Amino acid sequence: MKISNLQKYILKKIWHTNKIKVSRYNFNSFYHNKKKDPKKNLQIKIITKSIERLINRGLLTGFGEKTQYKLFINKVKLTPLGRKITKKILGEQIKLPFKKK
């Protein structure tokens, strides 16, 4: 299963918090250290899409409101499969940014 850097960040952030349900607004800090960060509106849309994809894969459970047309996610929680994948991610070595010539 291929997981993006943002999705890995979301899973790690939930894993390291002591709370069962984590607010989705904690994930905005992913873009603070980036050189070229997208605008705030685009950041929110990207994070929302990543959370929805993690929910569709069965790694997260979302809590919020569901209307006829849209899903509003306020808090998220790891599922047992999500815990297993997160442990696997935490065990991987970090790749160093070597310059290719």
Image (cartoon, rainbow, N blue to C red):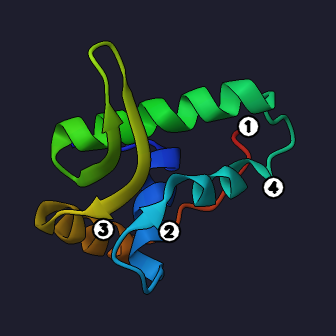
Ranked by sequence position, the earlier of labels 4 and 3 is 4
Using residue 13 as the reference point, say whether residue 85 is left or right of it.
left
As rendered, which of 67 and 100 lies closer to the eye? 67
Task: Quote the CA–CA distance across marks 1 and 4.
Answer: 26 Å
Q: Foreground residue, 59 or 4? A: 59
Give the foreground label among 3 and 2: 2
Q: Residue type at mark 3: give it.
A: Thr
Label 2 sits on what residue type?
Lys
Can I make out residue 2 in this image?
no
Q: Which residue is mark 4?
A: 33
Instruction: Tell me the residue at 71%/57% (across/down).
Output: 29
Provide the secondary structure element on which disc 3 rests.
Answer: helix
Q: Which of the numbered marks, if any, corresponds to residue 101?
A: 1
30 above or below 84?
A: above
Name the kind of residue labelled 4 in the image.
Answer: Asn
> Between tags 2 and 4, which lies in front?
2
Element class at badge 4? loop
- Measure the alpha-carbon separation of dots 4 and 3: 22 Å
Residue 70, image x and y in percent? 36, 20
Q: Which residue corresponds to mark 2?
A: 13
Q: Earlier in the sequence, mark 2 or mark 4?
A: 2
Badge 1 density bin: few <14, some 14–19, many ≥20, Cα 10 Å: few
Q: Secondary structure at mark 1?
A: loop
